[in-house]
Image: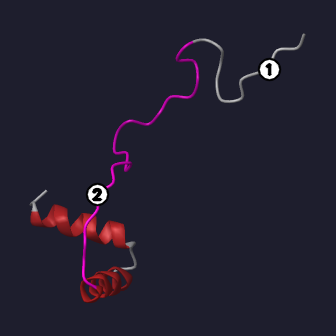
Amino acid sequence: METKKNTWGGARPNSGPKRKTEDRLDIKIYMRASEKEQQLIKENAEKKNISVAQYIREAVLKELNI
């Protein structure tokens, strides 16, 4: 009988690829905005040539003085 080979790591515990744990952007925060607010945020992000998420992240961190 042929055994299946695990394609994402070894058979031993913790033998697979190590996960990146620092500076991961996997936490989601939701907010509500009016259409006008959403459009302003989107336009300002485009002016800076960054994503809306990055624009909001920078604005919040700036406000928190981080």
Q: Position of residue 37 (x, y in %)?
A: 24, 84
Q: Is residue 2 above or below residue 38?
A: above
The residue pinned by badge 2 equals 29
Q: Quadrant of residue 20?
A: top left
Closer-to-camera residue (21/6): 6
Closer-to-camera residue (41/33): 33
Region rendered in magenta: 13-34
Residue at the spot x=27%, y=87% of the render?
40
Q: Position of residue 63 (x, y in %)?
A: 11, 66
Q: Residue furthest right?
A: 1
For badge 1, the amino acid type reads Lys
Residue at the spot x=34%, y=87% of the render?
43
**The N terminus, quarter of image:** top right
Q: Which mark is residue 4?
A: 1
Q: Position of residue 15 (x, y in %)?
A: 57, 18
Residue at the spot x=26%, y=64% of the render?
57
SS under mark 2: loop
**Horizontal side of residue 3 vs 58, given as left or right:** right
Mark closest to the chain's N terminus, 1 or 2:
1
**Horizontal side of residue 49 vs 66, given as left or right:** right
Q: Is residue 25 part of the magenta span, yes or no?
A: yes
